[in-house]
Image (cartoon, rainbow, N blue to C red):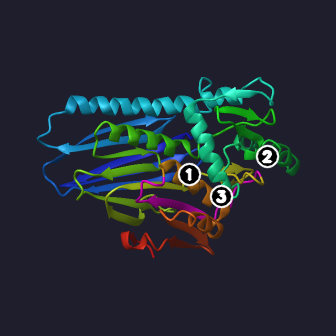
């Protein structure tokens, strides 16, 4: 699971709640997001809870209610249950915790041909990954753990991996090296294949917590974990959500703002965090599963937005990583397969920053630098 350093800033003006979350991901990506809520009802109150979870990822749950509602105790129980749900998913997917399900699979001593029963949630994550892997032409791949380990060792020894080392590790990378049957039994086709769901797990966790809150009668709320956000408005339908994209080169400046009434799912990934440094050279911290090499650093930021419940946060979480691997041209071709997904992609070309914005997002998006 991703580890992150955090700068967290909140600022309130009258009926507008603005919160800025700056997240530096030390394993997968750094995400800068600012969520702004315009509240048109002076009788509207919020119950908010914040925590650092999954080794330091800033997370937040907000529930909105009428001022005359007197259900604080019950709502607090719902929030507590939501944090427990986050923790439960963490105990499944965190590869750094020896007690997690993924870590136990990675540290297995069984033969590669044996079937291993996995939990329902892990089976869902594997099936999600199989689908996105296919859609992205292999750009998203949760079997990249051996590649990450190789480059972490390279950083420790201050020596980039040789082509021979890259070729060796690639033998243990690829979705074709695992199978999952209808009984949720996983088979590894090579003994050194290892899993890492850091590129999809936060989005999946946000999906589950959002569902839990809605099933418990929360009609208006927000769930955020790192760069993954889900907000919805059913009772107070005039609430306006704003998502501001942080400038990829200047942490004190915003790049653009997305403004819309209603439900929003959002995911942001990019190279905001410090790169891997080996022998004075900087490398991107995200890797191409087909080459075992860092991806190009030309794409600085990818933000995917969905206004529909058809697309999950898990899906857009994984797709942001796919675009970073594919590049903007091939990445946009993949995203266009999903009619419900809009995007803002920021790249660097010849020293200049260029953005690509989907047509469906343009009515809701304001660029502050173009």
Comparing labels 3 and 2, the label whose residue is closer to the camera:
3
Q: Disc number at residue 40?
A: none
- Image point 19% across, 33% down: which residue? 71
- 163 up-or-down from 55: above or below: below
Q: Determine which quarter of the picture holds residue 144.
A: top right
Label 3: which secondary element = loop
Q: Which residues are magenta?
A: 292-311
- Density class for disc 3 (Cα within 10 Å; few <14, some 14-19, many ≥20) is many
Quadrant showing the N terminus: top right
Residue under pointer 2: 159
- Image point 50% across, 52% down: which residue? 31
Residue with the most extreme right position: 164
Residue under pointer 3: 136
Label 1: which secondary element = loop
Residue under pointer 1: 273
* Sooner in the amino-acid sequence: mark 3 or mark 1: 3
- Density class for disc 2 (Cα within 10 Å; few <14, some 14-19, many ≥20) is few
Q: Position of residue 127 (x, y in %)?
A: 62, 43
């Amino acid at each position: 699971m991703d580890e992150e350093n955090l700068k967290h800033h909140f600022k309130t003006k009258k009926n507008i709640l603005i919160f800025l979350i700056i997240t530096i991901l030390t394993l997968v990506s750094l995400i800068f997001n600012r969520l702004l809520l315009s509240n048109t009802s002076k009788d509207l109150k919020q119950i908010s809870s914040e925590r650092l979870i999954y080794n330091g990822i800033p997370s937040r749950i907000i529930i909105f209610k009428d001022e005359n509602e007197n259900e604080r105790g019950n709502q607090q129980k719902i929030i507590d249950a939501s944090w427990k749900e986050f923790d439960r998913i963490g105990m499944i997917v965190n590869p750094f915790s020896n007690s997690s399900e993924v870590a136990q699979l990675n540290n297995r001593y069984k033969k590669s041909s044996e079937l291993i029963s996995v939990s329902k949630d892990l089976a869902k994550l594997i099936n999600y990954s199989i689908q996105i892997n296919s859609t992205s032409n292999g750009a998203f791949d949760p079997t990249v753990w051996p590649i990450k380990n190789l480059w972490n060792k390279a950083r420790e020894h201050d020596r980039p991996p040789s082509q021979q080392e890259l070729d060796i590790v690639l033998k243990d990378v690829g979705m074709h090296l695992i199978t999952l049957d209808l009984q949720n039994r996983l088979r590894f086709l090579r003994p050194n294949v290892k899993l890492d769901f850091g590129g999809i797990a936060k989005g999946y966790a946000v999906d589950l917590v959002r569902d839990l809150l809605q099933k418990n009668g929360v009609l208006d709320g927000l769930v955020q974990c790192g760069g993954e956000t889900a907000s919805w408005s059913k009772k107070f339908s005039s609430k306006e959500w704003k998502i501001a994209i942080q400038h990829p080169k200047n942490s004190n400046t915003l790049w653009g703002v997305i403004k819309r009434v209603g439900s929003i799912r959002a995911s942001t990934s990019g190279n905001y965090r410090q790169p891997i440094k080996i022998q004075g050279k900087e490398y991107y911290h995200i890797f191409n599963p087909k080459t075992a090499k860092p991806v190009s650093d030309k794409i600085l930021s990818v933000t995917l937005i969905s206004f529909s419940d058809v697309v999950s946060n898990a899906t857009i979480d994984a797709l942001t990583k796919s675009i970073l691997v594919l590049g903007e041209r091939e990445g946009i071709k993949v995203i266009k397969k999903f009619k419900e997904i809009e995007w803002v992609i920021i790249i660097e070309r010849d020293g200049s920053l260029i953005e690509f914005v989907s047509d469906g997002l343009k009515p809701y998006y304001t660029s502050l630098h173009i």
